[in-house]
Amino acid sequence: SKINHLILTLTQKKSNQQILRALEKKQEDVLQDLLNLKNETTKTIENLDQQVQEQEILRQNARTILSIIQRTKVQLIELRPTMNNEADQKLKKIDDDLKINYELFEQSLNDYKRIHGNISDDLDKIITRVIEDMTEVRARFNEKESELNAYNIIRDEYENIIEHTLKIIQLIEIKTQQSHSIDLRQNLDLLKDLTNEMQTHRSLIDRLQLLSSTLSSQLIDKNERERVRRRLNEIIRRWTQLEQDLMSEEENMEEMKNLTELYHYININCEQWLKQTRILINDLTNRRNVETFDQLIPKGKNTLFEYQTSLEHLQRLRNRLNRLVQTNRTPEASQKVYKKQSIDCFYDTIIISNFQRKTSYRYTLKFT
């Protein structure tokens, strides 16, 4: 305004036109400088406002990522192993979410630094805390990942042992149900081999019990713990039952072997007694003096007594075979029935022969 007043005064006094134009030019320059200064000031203020806003956004992002990190820590603490891959899937989702949010925060921080340069001290403290917490949560994540990997190794071993044990049980069950030869010794050796085979694999059951206990102690789901317990109990039940069946069958086969040997022994004795009876009857038939009869009659009585004893023994043997066959629960029952039928047939033959010999003997005594 002073310049305008000066120009107006000089104009009224009809001063030099060059001076007037110089003053007017100077006025225009000053006005332009003032306008530029105003624009720059306005722009600076706008930039400062924008920087403050972006700084506040960055500060809010830092608080958000801190909250996410704290939530992740809680999730890692609450995450427990499972018998399926659910825990691994949850861990992967936690890791993916954390990576995405942290990458967004890093991108906003880098953009701010590229545009505005340094950050304020209070924001720098928040960012430092974010970096420290992120380092800590990554360490916890690695620990949890190692924990789940170790659990998965135990779980896989547990599943493999169950599968292997079931195959062993099924294989031994099939072998015990197969039809074997009539040779009792061969069957008995086979049963002993199967028993030894089960004893060889007994360590699998012990290992399975240890793994089941380890898995259950880390499971928080009651249903999963119950499933682990039921599977273990079922394996142990089948294993124990198979051991008992093999032991019982081995005892039965051992008894059958003893009965068979006894059968052969009685068979030989009966054949000898039948032969002696024939000789005695011939002697009684061909002798006519009393002295000879006095010598042969006691011998004949002894022979009849031995016959009677042998037949009673044979009857007891047949009764034992009957009980053994009736109580037997294995495929060897058919073999035992075969043995029993053989002895029954032999027993009937002995009875008939004995009846014939006794009749002939009594007839000879009566005739004499």
Image: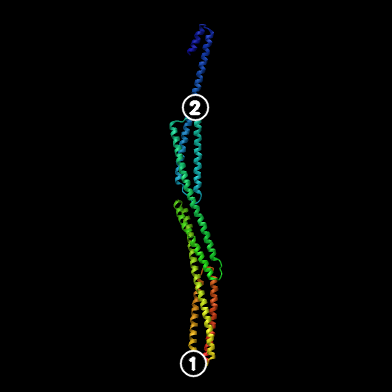
The residue type indicated by label 2 comes to Asn
Q: Compared with residue 286, is residue 223 higher up or lower down, i.e. above or below?
A: above
| Secondary-structure class at tag 1 | helix
* Residue shown at 51% from the left, 13% from the top: 26
Q: Earlier in the sequence, mark 1 or mark 2?
A: 2
Give x and y (percent) for residue 208.
Answer: 47, 56
Give x and y (percent) for residue 135.
Answer: 46, 40
The residue type indicated by label 1 comes to Glu
In front of the other: label 1 or label 2? 1
| Secondary-structure class at tag 2 | helix
Of residues 230 and 117, the one nearer the viewer is: 117
Q: Compared with residue 290, is residue 208 higher up or lower down, i.e. above or below?
A: above
Question: What residue sits right under mark 1 in the picture?
Answer: 291
Spatial separation of the CA atoms under disc 1 and disc 2:
153 Å
Say which mark, if any, is on residue 88.
none
Give x and y (percent) for residue 168.
Answer: 52, 60
Q: Tag 2: Cα neighbours inside 10 Å, few (<14), some, or many (≥20)?
A: few
Q: Tag 1: Cα neighbours inside 10 Å, few (<14), some, or many (≥20)?
A: few
Question: What residue sits right under mark 2 in the picture?
Answer: 47
Give x and y (percent) for residue 7.
Answer: 50, 10
Of residues 55 and 211, the one nearer the viewer is: 211
Q: Compared with residue 90, is residue 327 higher up or lower down, i.e. above or below?
A: below
* Residue shown at 50% from the left, 10% from the top: 8
